[in-house]
Amino acid sequence: MPPVQTTKQHTERSYYEGDVDFDLLAAEDADFAAICKISKDKRWVDFQDPNVVQQLTKTLLKCHFGLTISLPDDRLCPPVPVRWNYIRWIQELLDTTSDTYTDHHDPSREVLGLDIGVGASCIYPFLACASRPQWRMAGTDIDEHSLDYARKNVVANGLEQRVRLKLSSSAEAPLIPLDAMGVEDMDFVMTNPPFYSSDQDMQASYTGKFAPPSAVCTGAENEMICPGGDVGFVSHILDESLKLRGRVQWYTAMLGKMSSLQTIIAKLRELGINNFAVTCLQAGYRTKRWAVAWSFRGHRPRNDVARHGELVLGVLPTATAQTIAVKGLSRLVAGGKVDELAKELDVKWRWRGEMGIGVMEARENVWSRAARRNRRFARAGKGKEPPKQEAEEGESSEEDDNAVALAVKITCKEGEVELRWLRGSDYVLFESFCGLTKRALVGGR
């Protein structure tokens, strides 16, 4: 794909959290106002009417993202809020796992993603490109009818240079066709797979519920059903990821049931994949959906991103942050102690004293008693070592990059010090460094 060239201004949009305000939406769009009903001064819509559901989607895309789409009557009409929450979460995953360790959006970063099962709406590539001008997307689907609509929607939104679509015509073809696409690596893959393994499975999902589905479903069979349901589909992606590994930074998938999320998390743990993240994508008070992401690279997402939304304890990944209470210590004093500690160690240390923030990178555990004793012995035998040069933020050679066993960001505040796990595969190493820092701050070393 060609590089992105755009000067379009954009603002970061937050997650959808509550129900959509129909009054505000009706005031913005006359087409939506026309399909609303009013009862007891309250505006509402009939979610069992497919025309109404389509109009709500079209209005949200137009008013909130500047997008326009056309949809066939015999394919899924995607609700926007949960879809956007999925895209927003992926944005935060990438923003908090960059080489610069900055934990915020870098407008200059070019990102390439893949949506497996793009559908007629092409909604995920559209939301990604509308919100991030430097992002490009590829999309695949097994349904030519859906792809015909998706291609028309791409042209209608002027995204031909940023969204590329491909028909998956063979059941044996890879779900992540990097080689066929001529792509060496990719920032993320995503999928909103069929949730059910059979028609009986789909019908059983409604059994025992007190209310009908919250919205009418117009999806075709291939959009609703596949072998093994969502667990089977995501397991296939997991199998491919074991071969591709770091060629994709984040593998992500939406899941329809908490039990499906629990099954996939169990598989990740069985395979020893400990760098993963989970989220609840619920928007408003209707249907819940979940998403999981995993990576073979060492960059760790921020804790609130790795454990995002309403989740049960059993699916949570290892925490990527610890807070040390330093009652009675000012930010300046705590920062001085942290800076002194880091300079005693054989690590790369970037310290911004005026901000009370530092980033430490270590090639190995150099703070164990044995390592520190050996370092003192070497100093005594060879004289004082030359000072280590500080690299600029985000600067590292390829050799240094591959050798980083642990990277930690330390933020000193009044009364507490936060340690953020930025990089590494060994939680024990992170925990031991946190213990060392705590002893330096609140006890003798």
Image (spheres, rainbow, N blue to C red):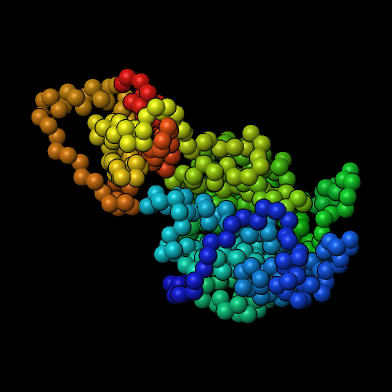
- Percent x, y of residue 425: 44, 38
Report x, y in % for residue 321.
Answer: 47, 37
User: In the image, is 294 to the left or to the right of 417?
Assistant: right
28 left or right of 358?
A: right
At a point 52% along the width and 53% down the height, the residue shown is 92
Give the image quarter of residue 67. bottom right
Does residue 418 appear anywhere in the picture?
Answer: yes
Image location of residue 412, percent across then percent down: 38, 37
Query: What percent of the width, then of the height, locates residue 114?
Result: 56, 62
- Between 119 and 105, the one nearer to me in the picture: 105
Which residue occupies 49% across, 74% down?
A: 8
Question: Which residue lies at the image location 68% right of the left edge and 74% below the top edge?
Answer: 69
> Can you say whether 73 is above or below 422 in the image?
below
384 up-or-down from 304: above or below: above
**Near-viewer residue (231 or 285):** 285
Which residue shows up at 49% across the image and 46% down it?
A: 301
- Count of all numbered marks drawn on residues in the image: 0
Foreground residue among 362 and 198: 362
- Residue 80: quadrant of the picture: bottom right
Locate the C terminus and report the quarter of the image it occupies: top left
Residue 419 visible in the snapshot: no
